[in-house]
Amino acid sequence: MMKFSKSLILAGIFLAASALAQSEQWLEYHTGTEGRAYHPFQLTTNPPPGIVLPKLNAPPFFARWLTPMDASGGRWMCFDRTRKSGPYDRLYLDSNGNGRLDDETPVPARLDSFNSYFPPVAVVFKGGDGPVSYHLVFRFYKYENSPAQLLASSAGWYEGVVNFGGLKKRIQLIDGNVNGTFNDLAQNPYDSDRIQVAGDKTSERFLGKMLEVEGKLFRIEAARDGAFVKVQNAERVLLGGVRVPETVSEFTAFGENGQFVRKPANGEFTLPAGKYQVFRWTINRKDEKGAAWTMSGYNFPKTAGFEVAAGKTAALEIGEPVQAVLKVDERSGRQLAFSLSFEGRQKEAIEMMRGGQRPPGPKLMLASANGTLCYTNTFEFG
């Protein structure tokens, strides 16, 4: 039997612990005045049960921010105003999670005609190694004859230099679904968190189990609070083929493995085996005058999913042809409202650009059956 000295055993334990520590690449927390991701909130006029309220000037609005970082599942907030009437320009948020709003300092808003913009508000969670901070910004708005609405944004993110197999890149880890955590993976991309890698032609990717950096695949794992990431080379990844029409210039898919952008060669490319959703396709062309045109499909329904299997090829029906959809809504006063949109083969929305700009809107001509009335108008975008 081989024997080892106590010092050698301790040294081995130390080296193993060091190797484990090195797998955690730590990031720094940053904040900004602009939101990095957005999420709509439900507003109510019903006071939350058991929450101690401050003295208020007007009938308040309430909302609850849901976050798994809080033991109770979320934090309540209240919107008030400094005058008896006018815009709601004061926010109380349970920043410390004690179930009270009367001990919070009110946050004032910057106002315009219909909007109240609140600066970053800090909330603090109890973490395993001490308190963890997070920042939110809010936009409270109410247009004429419309109910009040609330939009929340994540104003904090984690950033740092990460070693990808010898290639050092600065990354940003973003709370994409605005729930206070930074490691959410989901089938719906907008329920996932996001990551930016310096130099990546895709400005931002939805977070998955893998990340492509300069053509190389890495497995990635983010801490729930965003403080660090773990990366390693993705070894022995099973690949499957995907076939799209040869007219498609670029294709983006999202799934359990992450977000991938491909430029098909003769309509074919590969992806790591797994389940995906079609996220976007693009066709590039030039007209007879040499002007560059781009047609893209986006906002796909959930039914636009596909599976990539090792050694097999998945054929996708995307791209052309697209169809124009004209809708007519009858309004009061014998008025008709016309809307025109373009729809792809999977019922996705279509965008067309000329030289990076939207072309002039299409024209609508209305004529009576006997030809005595003829009216022409131009559709507007938006």
Image (cartoon, rainbow, N blue to C red):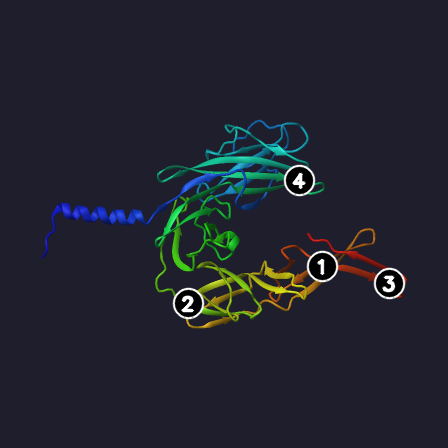
Amino acid type of the residue tagged 4 in the rendering = Lys
Identify the image quadrant of residue 288.
bottom right
Provide the secondary structure element on which disc 2 rests: strand
Of mark 2 and mark 3, the one earlier in the sequence is 2
Location of mark 1 (residue): 340
Amino acid at dot 3? Ser
Judge the density around disc 4: few (<14), some (14-19), many (≥20) Cα neighbours within 10 Å. Answer: some
**Among the two numbered marks 3 and 1 on one chain, the one whose residue lies closer to the N terminus:** 1
Distance of label 2 from label 3 (alpha carbons)? 59 Å
Which of the numbered marks, if any, corresponds to residue 239?
A: 2
Work out whether mark 2 precedes mark 4 in sequence or the reverse, and give the earlier one.
4
Question: Residue at coordinates 54% horizontally, 63% vertically from top-left?
Answer: 250
Q: Does residue 280 sit above or below 194 in this rendering?
A: below
Q: Does residue 379 appear to the left or right of 163 in the view shown?
A: right
Location of mark 4 (residue): 142
How packed mark 2 is, by other alpha carbons closer than 10 Å (few <14, some 14-19, many 20 or more), is some
Label 3 to label 4: alpha-carbon separation: 41 Å
Q: Nearer the viewer, mark 2 or mark 4?
A: 2
Foreground label between 2 and 3: 2
Classed neighbour count for the residue bearing mark 1: other residues with Cα under 10 Å, few (<14), some (14–19), many (≥20): some
Q: Amino acid at mark 2?
A: Leu
Q: Which residue is pictured at 60% across the width and 61% down the height? A: 296
Q: Nearer the viewer, residue 295 or 4?
A: 295
Q: Earlier in the sequence, mark 2 or mark 1?
A: 2
- Give the CA distance from mark 1 to mark 4: 28 Å
